[in-house]
């Protein structure tokens, strides 16, 4: 497919005064600027409802950078802040869009393209697109980048996608899943497809099961309205975890190209078997401890009782030749004992042990891919314990470990959005999610939610600072599997 090639010389940020902009977008852009990775022409126009002028927005941005970007990554902040301008806008009405368009044109050099980043409530997507269209900001040299949540089920997501598609073709729509901007997530592709070792054994003949864990120590973080309507399944599984699963399970794409990679991911997402209620466990945290501090329960933070899950564990299956009979155990939760995102690939036992009866302690191999906070890859191998073996050979698991920051000590560790914003400006869609992927993800999630509804399933409680409700342990233990902790 021919993707329109142009570099944007203007970035228009909707929701520019919001949390994502302050914590991630502005810091990422400033860090790219400090590293000389933004062209001199690039202008950033912020827009939001707040009444600010350019100077007010620059002040807000400076404060955000001082709070969220380490000093050694800020470079000359003055140079970066000079790229910023601001136009206040009430996106619910069409009126302000002409003034916004004037500001956007003012910032351009005439020839470059425009990248629009929508980081606003989904309810504003439709009126925003209408306003952009009316003001002539949807032309051929305009890209649209969308931040989650993109709906709350397949139907609402399709509505959003339809509204955007009315003004932008798919090859100019960039849907963010910030996990795809993480270095170790991209490294999964390198590990699988740049090494001959793994591909021949990456299937149900040799792999027994896969575990994907995304554990967080934080609780509600003040996101009361949003989170209680979403819950862990929609907030984390629908997007980040299913993307991780797709990268682990996909067939080798023919190239590292947006169409090839996304074609393979969507096949996996479509091959996900509908999960039964018995294959899912939900939980909600109660008061406990996090990082040595007493923390309140979810219901206390929320101020009322709720059935929203802050933890979910799922036994998933990918129904195709490669993965027949290999469970993918997924779990994610708030207020877990530690912040960790990892993928564990558990291999099968050797078919016949020559050490049988020697008390050798033979264990199947495991590959552990740490995504955060540590970026490391550990292959557990069996080795003989040194000795004369008078009581028989003894074996022990030893790690073959690579710590990415050590292996690439000279490389800059980056915020996931740095990569994604740069790709948006350049127009590379490889690390963005295509509509068919999002819809396959929602379809699978909607079925789970419908099952919960049918069964009247409510979350089990777990104490903050623990690995979730007891049901999560039972989910794997009945298959003779323990969660990696
Ligand atoms: C977001 C979720 O998409 O991802 C948050 O809405 C979650 O609830 C966050 O905390 C986790 O991202 P990261 O990069 O900190 O693992």
Image (cartoon, rainbow, N blue to C red):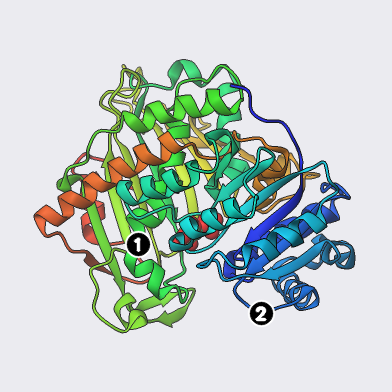
> For this view, does 377 lie left or right of residue 51?
left
Which residue lies under the disc numbered 2?
51
For the residue labelled by badge 2, is the local secondary structure a helix, a strand or a loop?
loop
Q: Residues within 10 Å of mark 1 (few under 14, many from 20)?
A: some
Which residue lies under the disc numbered 1?
230
Q: Position of residue 253 (x, y in %)?
A: 53, 20
Q: Residue at position x 23%, y 47% from top?
A: 448
In front of the other: 386 or 71: 71
The answer to whether 55 is drawn above or below residue 480 in the figure is below
Q: Earlier in the sequence, mark 2 or mark 1?
A: 2
> For this view, does 176 lie left or right of residue 284?
right
Q: Position of residue 475 (x, y in %)?
A: 22, 48
For the residue labelled by badge 1, is the local secondary structure a helix, a strand or a loop?
helix
The answer to whether 2 is drawn above or below residue 134 in the figure is above
Q: Residue at position x 85%, y 56% from top?
A: 34
Q: Please tell me whether mark 2 or mark 1 is closer to you in this view.
A: 2
Please say whether residue 391 is visible from this viewpoint. no
Q: Residue at position x 42%, y 44% from top?
A: 162
Please say whether residue 413 is visible from this viewpoint. yes
The answer to whether 212 is drawn above or below residue 300 in the figure is above
Q: Quadrant of residue 98?
A: bottom right
């Amino acid at each position: 497919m021919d993707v329109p090639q142009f570099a944007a010389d203007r970035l228009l940020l909707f929701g520019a005064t919001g949390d994502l902009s302050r914590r991630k977008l502005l810091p990422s852009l400033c860090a790219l600027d400090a590293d000389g990775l933004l062209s001199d022409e690039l202008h950033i126009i912020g827009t939001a409802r707040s009444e600010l002028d350019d100077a007010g927005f620059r002040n807000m941005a400076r404060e955000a950078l001082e709070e969220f970007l380490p000093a050694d990554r800020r470079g000359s902040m003055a140079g970066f802040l000079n790229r910023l301008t601001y136009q206040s806008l009430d996106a619910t009405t069409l009126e302000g869009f002409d003034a916004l368009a004037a500001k956007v044109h003012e910032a351009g050099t005439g020839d470059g393209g425009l990248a629009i980043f929508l980081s606003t409530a989904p309810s504003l997507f439709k009126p925003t697109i209408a306003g952009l269209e009316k003001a002539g900001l949807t032309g051929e040299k305009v890209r649209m980048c969308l931040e989650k949540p993109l709906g709350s089920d397949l139907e609402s997501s399709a509505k959003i996608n339809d509204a955007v598609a009315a003004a932008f073709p798919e090859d100019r729509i960039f849907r963010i899943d910030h996990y795809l901007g993480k270095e170790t997530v991209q490294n999964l592709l390198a590990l699988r497809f740049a090494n001959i070792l793994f591909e021949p054994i990456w299937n149900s003949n040799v792999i027994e099961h896969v575990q994907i864990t995304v554990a967080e120590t934080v609780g509600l973080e003040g996101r009361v309205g949003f989170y209680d309507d979403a819950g862990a399944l929609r907030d984390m599984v629908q997007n980040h975890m299913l993307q991780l699963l797709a990268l682990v399970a996909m067939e080798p794409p023919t190239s590292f190209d947006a169409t090839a990679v996304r074609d393979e991911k969507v096949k996996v997402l479509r091959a996900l078997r509908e999960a039964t209620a018995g294959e899912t466990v939900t939980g909600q945290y109660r008061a406990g401890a996090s990082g040595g501090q007493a923390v309140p329960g979810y219901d206390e933070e929320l101020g009322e009782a709720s059935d929203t899950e802050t933890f979910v564990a799922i036994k998933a299956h990918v129904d195709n030749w490669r993965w027949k009979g290999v469970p993918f155990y997924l779990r994610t939760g708030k207020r877990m004992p530690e912040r960790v995102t990892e993928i564990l690939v558990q291999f099968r036992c050797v078919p016949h042990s020559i050490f049988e009866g020697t008390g050798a302690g033979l264990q199947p191999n495991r590959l552990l891919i740490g995504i955060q906070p540590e970026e490391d890859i550990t292959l557990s191998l069996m080795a003989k314990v040194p000795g004369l073996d008078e009581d028989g050979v003894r074996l022990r698991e030893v790690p073959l470990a690579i710590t990415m920051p050590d292996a690439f000590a000279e490389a800059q560790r980056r915020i996931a959005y740095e990569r994604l914003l740069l790709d948006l400006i350049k127009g590379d869609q490889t690390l963005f999610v295509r509509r068919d992927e999002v819809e396959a993800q929602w379809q699978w999630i909607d079925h789970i939610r419908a099952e919960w509804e049918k069964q009247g399933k409510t979350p089990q409680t777990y104490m903050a600072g623990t690995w979730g409700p007891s049901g999560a342990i039972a989910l794997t233990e009945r298959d003779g599997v323990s969660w990696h902790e």
